[in-house]
Image (tube, rainbow, N blue to C red):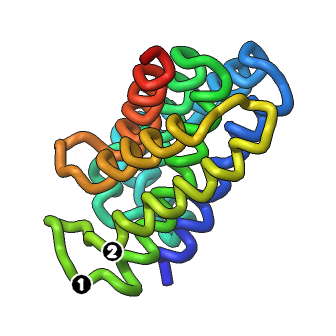
Amino acid sequence: MTLIYRKLYRLSGIIFPLTYYFTNKKLTLSVLAVITILIVVVEILRFLLPAFNQRIFRYFGLILKEQEETRISGTSYFLIASLLTIFIFEKAIAITALTFAVFGDAVAAMAGKLFGKIRIREKSLEGSMACFIACFFIGFILIYTNLWVNIKLVFFGALAATMMEILPIGIDDNLTMPLFTGLIMELVRLL
């Protein structure tokens, strides 16, 4: 049940690509920077003050992974990745990469939990396939917005997001997924 709450919470991350879509880079980065700084301060405090950390887990335990009690949370990684993605990449690529990270990660986890049979370390092939399908579907919808993404960018972006979701590279995929997806989409756009 906590997985459902965690993934519903993760879907709230769509607020950042939506904010960027409807506003501009400067405003989005400003809002995101303030939120990121606040969350990083909370992270530092919870590592310095064990009682505060316990309180955080008592109140927010439904959306935090057990392992996050002793390591940086996925939320912090996602916020940092969102800041960097929006700062580095042009609007269409940043929004697409972040949207893939939000939906791809959530769908992969749910599908992996429900249907995952073929294990690839702690992930499942079925979850990764669901990630690709979700990203491709979302990307297909984004083609019909004024973002100017095309099917080639969507395909390679969905593939990049899926690779970062499943590959055990030792860095949290909340950080790597949007950045790697943006990089691959930028390279494809330039070719």
Q: Are marks 1 and 2 in contact (CB under 8 Å)?
A: yes
**Upstream in the sequence, badge 1 or badge 2?**
1
The furthest residue to the left: 121
| Residue at (74% x, 13% y) in the render | 26
Q: Position of residue 101 (x, y in %)?
A: 50, 47
Q: Position of residue 174 (x, y in %)?
A: 41, 45
Above or below residue 3? Residue 154 is: above
| Residue at (57% x, 73% y) in the render | 5
User: Neighbour class for label 2 at 10 Å: few (<14), some, many (≥20)?
Assistant: many
User: Mark 1 is on which residue type?
Assistant: Lys
On screen, residue 13 versus residue 108, left or right, reads: right
The residue that disc 2 covers is 126
The CA span between labels 1 and 2 is 7 Å
On screen, residue 159 versus residue 96, left or right, reads: left
The residue that disc 1 covers is 117
User: Mark 2 is on which residue type?
Assistant: Glu
Label drawn at residue 75:
none
Above or below residue 175? Residue 148 is: above
Q: Position of residue 109 (x, y in %)?
A: 41, 69
Is residue 116 in sight in this rendering? yes
| Residue at (20% x, 78% y) in the render | 118
Quadrant that contains the C terminus:
top left
User: Neighbour class for label 1 at 10 Å: few (<14), some, many (≥20)?
Assistant: few
Say which of 182 and 76 sits in front: 182
Is residue 49 in sight in this rendering? no
Q: Position of residue 88 (x, y in %)?
A: 52, 15
SS state under label 1: loop
| Residue at (71% x, 19% y) in the render | 30
Count of numbered circles in the view: 2
On screen, residue 138 versus residue 57, left or right, reads: right
SS state under label 2: helix
Say which of 76 and 29 sits in front: 29
